[in-house]
Structure formats: C-alpha cells, structure tokens
Amino acid sequence: MILGVRHDDLRKRNRAMVIAAVRRDGQPSRTDLVSRTGLSHSTISAISSDLIAEGVLRPVKTGENEVVRRGRPQVSLGLEPKAATVLTVVLLLNTLSATVFDYAGQVVAQRRERLATLDAARDDLVGAVAQMIEAVLEDAGRTPADVMRMTMAVQGITDSGARAMLWTPITPESDIPFADILEKRFGFPVTVQNDCNMIAVALRARDPERYRDNFVTLLLSNGIGMGLVLRGELFTGAYSSGGEFGHMIHRPGGALCRCGRHGCIEAYAGNYAILREAAGRSDQTAADADVDPETMLKLANDARAGDGPARDAFRRAGEAIGYGLGSLFALIDPAPVAIVGPGTLAFDVMEPSIRDAIAQTAGGQHDAVISFDLETDEMPLILEGCARRALEAVDNELFAPGYIATMQATS
Amino acid sequence: MILGVRHDDLRKRNRAMVIAAVRRDGQPSRTDLVSRTGLSHSTISAISSDLIAEGVLRPVKTGENEVVRRGRPQVSLGLEPKAATVLTVVLLLNTLSATVFDYAGQVVAQRRERLATLDAARDDLVGAVAQMIEAVLEDAGRTPADVMRMTMAVQGITDSGARAMLWTPITPESDIPFADILEKRFGFPVTVQNDCNMIAVALRARDPERYRDNFVTLLLSNGIGMGLVLRGELFTGAYSSGGEFGHMIHRPGGALCRCGRHGCIEAYAGNYAILREAAGRSDQTAADADVDPETMLKLANDARAGDGPARDAFRRAGEAIGYGLGSLFALIDPAPVAIVGPGTLAFDVMEPSIRDAIAQTAGGQHDAVISFDLETDEMPLILEGCARRALEAVDNELFAPGYIATMQATS
DNA sequence: CTCTTTTTTTTCGAGCCTCGAAAAAAATAA
DNA sequence: TTATTTTTTTCGAGGCTCGAAAAAAAAGAG
C-alpha cells in the first residue's frame, strides 16, 4: 500500500533529522543544524527547544576549542546522556560480552567472559547471556526497565527480522530466537544482528568520508564474514542477514567447507583451510573449529620466508577471496574494502594474489577504486556498531515515532 | 547532507502518491484512493481536482463492469492521455526500434528496423537512432517539443547515471554518450538503461503480486543478462548498471568469454558457449557474435534425444547458471527468477542441472522459494519497462517536482 | 564604563496543508 | 415523491514551516 504523508509526520521527520544530525556531528549549534538540514531558524529553534524540554538534548558548554568571535556565541547541543540506556551483547566463539551505554553513547558498564560456546547446550547459551545482562545492569546501577533497547551481535546467520540466530559456527545449536526469549524475560526490545553487519555500521559511523554509500567489510578469521553497504544502507538478504560471501562458490565441487558443502570461498580462505593446505592435509579433511592466532602467525611467517606449502596456501586463499570479490564487483561494481579481524595479520601475504585474481574478473575493470584498509581487532568495531544501531533505533522509534514506518511505506 | 522536509514537499509527495496510485491501479475512484493512500477524503478531493484542472487526470466513464449499487456512484479517475508524450528506443543486436507513448501508456506510433549493428560505425549508430526518432515522431504527429522524456534501452553496460552505453556486445564501439547526444539534438531529457533492468521494471509492473520486493530476471541469449530488484528497488551498481551476472567467475581460468576474460558464467551458458561445446570445439575458441535460433533449437532437440555432446553442453550451461545463482543467493537470499529470452526454449534441458547446482550451494537452503518463470519474447517486456520508466519519471519530475530529490536526500 | 556592531536565537504573523464533521450531490429503494 | 445510501465537496480548526523582526549575548571602540 502506498501511504500518504500525514501532516504530523512532518514534525516527526524533522525531529528525527535533528536528532540524527546531533548524533552524527557531535555537538552542533542551532546554526549548524540550520545549514545541515536546510530547515529555517524558526523551525530548528522550535524543535530543539522541544527536545531540550523533553530531556532528549541539552545545551553544552563549548570547550576552549571554540574560536573567540564577535557576536552572540553559538550554543552547542549535545545528547542528554540520561535520556536513555541501551544494552549490547556480543556473542562470539568462546567469548561473551555485554555493555551498557548511555544515550550519548558512552560506556556505563562492561563485562566480558570466556564461555565454551562449542560445548554449551542451547539453554546454557541463553542462560549465560541472561545472567550477564543481569550482572552488567547491576554494575551500571540500572534495571531492565531502564533499558530502552538491546542489540545483540552474533557470529553467523540471523533472520532478516533480526529476531533469531539461524546458524552459527560457534555452536552446533541453531535457530535460537534470542530476541523472543530475552524480550520475554526482560521486557525491553531486542534485535539480533550479524557481527559483520555491525562492523559495517561502525565503520560508517567512524569514517563517513570513506565509508558512505558503497563499501564492503570482510572479516577474515576461521570463517569469512561480510558486511555490505549499498547506497548508504546496510544490505541484508530477503530472509536472512545475507551477505554470505564466504559461501559463494569458488570451485564447484571443490574443497570441503565447514558448512558441509564443497568449494565455498571459505573452504580455501578460512583459517582452517589455510592450515589444512599448509599442513599438506587433503582438502576434504574436516575443518578445525578454531585455529589459534599463534599458528596463523607462524604460517604467515613461513609464507613470508619463501616458497613452500605455507606460501601456496595463502596464495590459494588470496585467489579465492580475489575471485569472490571480483564476482561480487561484477554485480555491484567495485567498492572500498575494509579487511577486519585476525586475518589482517597475514594480509600482506595474500594481497598480491587477491589483486591478481580481481584483475582477471569483470569487477577488476576499475581496479583503481579498490582499496583495502586493515583493522585487526574486530571486537571494538562490533561493539560500536551494536551501540550505534541500538541508539539510532531509540532516536527514531522513541523520539520521532512513525518516522520509519512512514518512510518504508513509501516504496 | 541531511535534508529536512519543507512544508510544500508534503503536497508534492501526496500528489505523487495519487498519480502513482492511478497509474498502478488503472482507474481508481476517489474513495479507492482514500483507502490506498490513507489520506483523508478532503485531501484526496483537493488533490484530484487540482490534477484534473491541470490536465493530468480526468474523470472516466465507468464501464458496464461496475456493479449497480445504491448511492452516489463512484467516479473513476484515469490518466489524461494528452498530458504528456514519451518516447522509447530499444537498441539490440541487429535491431532498432522506437515507440511513442501517450501519458496513459498507450502506443501512438511504432517503428522497427533491422540494423547491422556489428558493422555500424559509431556515427552510423547514433545517426540511425536519431533518424528513427524523427520518423516515429512524424508518424505520431508529434514534434520533439512535445516529448517530455525518452528512455533508451541497450544491450550491455550503461553508466549508473543512465547517460551512456559503456560497453555492448552489439558493436565494437564503446562509451557512446547517447543521452548527451540526443538531448542536445532534440531537447528532451534522455536516459539510457540496460535492457535487463527494463525487463525487471516491466515484470514488476505486470505482476506486482509475484514480482515485488525481491526477484531476479535472467536474459538467456548469446550473452547472459541480469536484472535485479532488491527491497522493491531496481538494483544498479555504484558506477554502472551493474548486475553483470554473466561475468561472475564460474571456473577460475576456465573457458574463454566473449569479454576476453576466462571462466565467466557466460563462457559456459551463453549460446555461443553451448554451441562451441556441443560442436566439440575448444573452450578457448573465440565466441560467435550471434547464434541463430534455429541452431539452438536443433541443439536443444539433440539434447532431448539423449546423451551426447549437446546434452553435455546444456548440462554444463545449467551448472554454470546454477552455481552462479547459488552464489548470488548466498549474498541476497533466494528469490523468484524470471527466465527471459530465446534461452527459454531450451530451458527444460538445463533446468535439472541448474537445480542440482543450486542445491549444492549456500543459496540452496530454502530452495522451495526458488521458482522459475519463463517468457520467451523479451522485446515486449523491454518496451514496456522503458515506457514505464519514462512515464514514472514524468509523473514524479513534472507533476510533483521535488519529490524524488527530497526522498533521496533522506538517507 | 557605555555605546555600537556583530552574530545567534527566539518570537510572531502569514500562508499552506491535512483533518474531521457537516453539507451537498447523485444515485437507488420504497 | 420521499427516504436511504454512498460518494464527493466544503469549511473551519489545528499544526507546521517560513521570513522578518525582535531580543539576546557577546566583542570592540571610544
């Protein structure tokens, strides 16, 4: 159905714009907001005084960084930290962490623990998450009723409604509806997101100059994850979180993948695949659940030292990634790529074969556009992305209700 | 920049909604429009009487199909044919056609001619197009000044701004900026679109139930083209029309493709590739520029008759398409696929191997969702898509200016 | 220390837009 | 001819944004 725009939606949208501008720009003055949004002084004045009265924004003392100029000084507006509390949970292989953020995006409390996810039963996983949520909320001096939203990031595939973890390499369990379970238990809204997608959100927030409309994030670890931003929007599949770059087919009927199929990119470029190849094992050998970083560093050093099985393994890994990126670029055109995770430590060994492979594909046409940025530690990015997602949801749903609904109904 | 919504944008948007609803629904009454758009009777009344006064819409006599009911009868609103004239040009291998449509989408005049595109020099192509435009406009009794928009569809890659044909299999010439040239010559706005994208637009318009948010169109011919609709929007690359499914890599370093690279899907599934394989030629043999339909039909019949080189060739073609779709589905999740073009005549021979290959990929998980619809004649679809594009552009830009700009600036 | 200048922010009335309710219009049913 | 039903238009109320003017808050000049 095509929805018309009702009159009050206008104010809601413009409120959302103002909040979004404040979140992005840090501490803009009303005058800054006028130029950012194209709205008039009168409108900005009205909206911002409303938002201040409601406790969403607050005037902040400008630091010494402000140039002393003639005239009435600008008053910067900032997000009121007390306006909301959001919660993030990150569940990765053998690691669980939970963080409480205030509305301004500052960490209030954080917990992190080792958890043997591979051996944990379904209820153990859910129980561990719930327990950690309770603990970190207590650390933060908040109750579940204070939390306006929670975003959970998991390794693996989630559903497109962001309600459940459909499949994950971190445990044999599948289809765990974390959102339903946690919402029922705690009463706040929960979404479940793919870790790589959160990395993409974080990069976009961190460096909007470089990562704006179209870019790719690749998480190189035991598996290969991808986050994709197209036309400025996080790309997800129709039913799932999508973007399963690691399971695009590199060689039909080829090496055995962790997912049980054959010839996936991951079966050549995942850590387990590189190790398997370098160790001279058959490419039909079952995958290791995890490979420790030291082993990978040693392999990378072997590869750097000269020709041999390690160098071959990385070359094949790079080839798989390169052809995969080339195929992806045939579909969406080349875009900047951010490489994230432990795999960055061996990226120099793979980069030549990646570039060679891309050059042999249709996506290699404009290869000047293709740049790789490296970021070894994925954890802060995932956390940042989750927090951002949760906070933006609060921005839209709570302080400008109807905004999202109206916009989506447009198409 | 984040753009706020100004007050007059509201009316523009709602006008656009009303026009779009009329175009989609055929001849809705004002009451229908109220339920379609969610706007009030008062608003619909005001907007529609404006549009009628401006000559965009007109009240139409309802046919006999209307049930006789008590109460004031509904007055249906239709598009006023005289409100605008649009032009479409379709340039394919050895074929050029031009059609004039009225604002209601009816054909006013049409021309079609054979043109040896492979041998035509750059200026010949441009000249032939320009000449045909002049001729068809004269047939229609219109002048260039009457034309509010033209959409041109070409085989091959266009730029994302829809201004130029970047590369095409129909002639060795490349980078022909048709939009600039024709705009300069005729004075009306021109866009240049990829043919498969127009097929997707047409299918969406024809059957919105089936083809709505996510679907794929594959054009099987001498080359392999793709149109992709994601989240209800036509998908194009960042720099080009994108969606070069045929040039995703199927077998690294494999068969020689028409594009000069090796191992592309097209190098296994294009007509020339199937013929090459069935005839027992090396897969490094240069591609035929075109293969006539009779030859392909004969090959398909050979394949149906039993095992042999023809059956193998189609099996390999199906495998390439299947693995390609599987890789695509790993990224975007499975979606309905419409198969269009001469290749549909041999689709029964390929379908088993396509489905087998998909089943071996990550995208094969939910294979119940994957359905194939066939449509042999692509020409009417391309034409319909072009007309639709041009008319919708007129709807938005002319009768509700600012609508598009505002919406895009939102993100 | 006071007055002027400059810049930011708020206030105020005008002009639109949408909405709901009531009225008007146009048909059928009694 | 009158009552009923349904569609469409009219009209006043309430909101929103805008531009212009006013107010506020600082530095600079004398």
Image (cartoon, coloured by chain):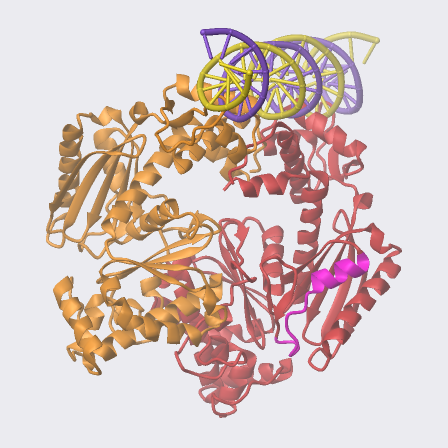
Chain colours: A orange, B red, C purple, D yellow
Q: Is residue B277 left or right of residue B105?
A: left
Residue drawn at (50%, 92%), measured in percent from left and top?
A: B281
Question: Foreground residue, A207 or A329?
Answer: A207
User: Where does residue A189 sit, x and y in percent of width and height?
Assistant: 30, 33
Residue B38 in the magenta stretch? The answer is no
User: Where does residue B351 sit, x and y in percent of width and height?
Assistant: 46, 71
Q: Is residue B43 visible?
A: yes
Q: Is residue B51 left or right of residue A372?
A: right
Residue B181 in the magenta stretch? The answer is yes
Q: Is residue A262 visible?
A: no
Question: Foreground residue, B92 or C9?
Answer: C9
Residue drawn at (31%, 76%), measured in percent from left and top?
A: A253
Q: Is residue A252 left or right of residue C2?
A: left
Residue drawn at (28%, 69%), measured in percent from left and top?
A: A348
User: Where does residue B105 sit, x and y in percent of width and height?
Assistant: 74, 50
Residue drawn at (42%, 56%), measured in percent from left and top?
A: A215
Question: Foreground residue, A134 or B384?
Answer: A134
**Relative to B196, does residue B31 appear above or below in the rendering?**
above
**Relative to B61, does residue C3 appear above or below in the rendering?**
above
Q: Which residues are magenta?
A: B169-186
**Relative to B82, does residue A70 appear above or below in the rendering?**
above
